[in-house]
Amino acid sequence: MSEMITADLVDLDLSADSKQAAARSLAGRMAALGRVTDLDGFLADVAAREAQAPTGLDGGIGIPHCRSTHVTEPTLAFGRSAAGIDFGAPDGPADLVFLIAAPAGADDAHLTILSALARRLMDADFTAALRSVRHPAAAAALIRGDRAPEPAADSTEGAESTDDTEGTEGKAGKEDKAGKEGTEGAGGAVEAVGSPASTAADGRPSDGTSDERAGSGGEAAGPPVFRIVAVTSCPTGIAHTYMAAEALENAGRAAGVEVVVETQGSAGFTRLDPAVIAAADGVIFAHDVPVRDKDRFAGKPTVDVRVAAGINRPGELIDEVRRKAARGETTPAAAHAAGAGGAGAGTPVERSGERGDGYGTKLRTWLMSGVSYMVPFVAAGGLLIALGFAIGGYRIDKAPSVVDHFVWTQAGSWAALLFQIGQVAFAFLVPVLAGYIAYGMADRPGLVPGFVGGSVALTVDAGFLGGLAAGLISGGVVMAVQRVRIPAVMRGIMPVVVIPLLSSAVTGFLMFVVIGKPIATAQRAMTDWLSDLTGTNAVLLGALLGLMMCFDLGGPVNKVAYTFATAGIAVSDPSGSAMKIMGAVMAAGMVPPLAMALATTVRGRLFNRTERENGKAAWVLGLSFITEGAIPFAAADPLRVIPSAMAGGAVTGALSMAFGATLRAPHGGIFVVPLIGNPLLYLVAIAAGVVTTTALVIVLKTLRRPAPDATAGASGATTGQEDSADVAQPVTV
């Protein structure tokens, strides 16, 4: 196995002026050694990870990283920038840049080494040594752990000696040994302040048991040790997961608090001992992906934040969980992982989300939680009903129940069966929507009142809007109940008896008596308005929905338009206007990937090699109504791709409405065209939008100022940066 980092992978004079240029420079070194097989493909994967969350950390550190199929073996490249590069850290640019590349199927041993590096980045002596080292070989040795950094307080001569690659054994032997041991152990799934390998805050060895609180031999041991269990995780599970763990452990030592961390990273994880969790006084979740088996931590004071908070302000998190414990605040189940944050003062809405997140951000997260669970029911039910109509005709909805009448040899019976199964699936839509909005707010305790509230919404004819309200009410009620200080003896029955009982009763009362009827009235008014849309108004609505579908290519705005359309057909007998809206939305959503596929076919020289490969896949994605197929193109060139896609989507949406094309199925793309009203004109609308977007993209890319290496890229003279660097480098807006 090759060394993860060598002198060839170190650039102590990194001259890049942006994070994209820095990633390209360091990745080029990996490609030169054969560790990256497709430079542009790998950089696209790096950009995709960067888009999830900034990789800049306090203290002048940037750690762009990703898993990629274009990486042959786990590799680390290091660059040092004199001017600094903005990686989105709160305290400013980074001068130390680590590009971490892991294969898609990296083994645990390699990921363990990467996790060890992540932990060492929290060591001030380590980062100080990297800022002063003068030779690439010495920097590589420091990063590998072959040699230990001199303590920051050492003399200048001692610091300079770290630049030499030989003669360090006698001087830093003890540190070397400790550094290597740290490298071997840092990637383990669980590391704890107060574990057998460490010491407690008072300097005594700690075995992590409750005996420490009482002392030994009956002697006084001072105040009881406050114990915290924590879970850290990040999208790739390579760097932030372990850096947050190290930061929390270090902050715990400084505060005299015992912190035991479960790192749920790519190298796997080992669950904390249930006895350790039971003995804990509080819990910290620092995560960007859902915490696995979160119910293990129910009934304890909990702070729930994103992983960056665990790295940047661990001391504040520890203080916060201690304050919650002092107030007796317990959280039977933490908030939804997608956007949950630490609990604090204020309304239930204000208590969730990363500190600083606005009301709109948290509300969108909760609503998308419900929509994501509802959409499969819409797709299954809608397609079954559409097939029923296709086989049995437009009067199939009047067929008797297949329980009473089913003839195996009659197509009509099979059509009725499909239709009635689809109706049953549709009956779950509003309860599922409401239940999983509440789940997004309050985790599992929100499911029961959410489903109850959604069912009440159907009973009072409040429909889709009633489901939204029921979900938000249910989640808010559960979160309010969870804030009440509960005696320890009752905590065990809270999640299964008390919370479901109280929250269901309150939600049901509000939906039946207070807000259900007004929402039902509003729902009917909206349906009547849509049914009356004709001519110019309908065309304008189609254009607006087309713009929304193509604005963020599968993001929140796209989902709002799609949810609006599916809500209209989520009944057994939707209106003609609702089916026209569904048709316009699906047609517009097919435009961006199809247009990018066509553009890469007719003018391939305007796109780099990776984009041309993505263009081949975009044909299938576009025909299948997967708008996200255009995201790689928009990420690389948003200022040209997104406006072009929106123009084409608006044209298609407007034409689809003008042609009166109807769609009963909420998904399916080209495969459900036989089920569409006016299918030929529907295809004409899609083709018009695709041509519009393709033409605009080609014109805009042709008019751009040529990149310095465009000529070489066109002639095929370049090896790793094919075509224009202006196109190949992902940018953000």
Image: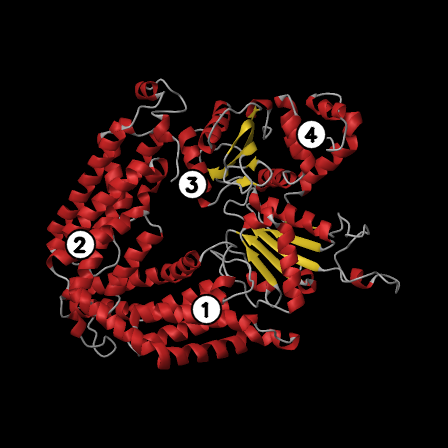
Which residue was labeled with disc 1? 475
Picture residue at 49% right of the left edge, 71% below the top: 478
Q: Nearer the viewer, mark 2 or mark 1?
A: 2
Amino acid marked by disc 1: Gly
CA separation in Å, label 4 and label 2: 66 Å
Question: Dot 2: within a 10 Å radius of its alpha carbon, few (fewer than 14), some, or many (20 or more) residues?
Answer: some
Q: Nearer the viewer, mark 1 or mark 3?
A: 1
Picture residue at 15% right of the left edge, 48% below the top: 685
Q: Which mark is residue 540?
A: 2
* 544 up-or-down from 567: above or below: above
Question: Dot 1: within a 10 Å radius of its alpha carbon, few (fewer than 14), some, or many (20 or more) residues?
Answer: many
Which residue was labeled with disc 3? 48
Question: Dot 3: within a 10 Å radius of its alpha carbon, few (fewer than 14), some, or many (20 or more) residues?
Answer: some
The numbered mark, 1 or 3, whose residue comes first in the sequence reads 3
Total of numbered circles in the picture?
4
- Front residue of 394/531: it is 531
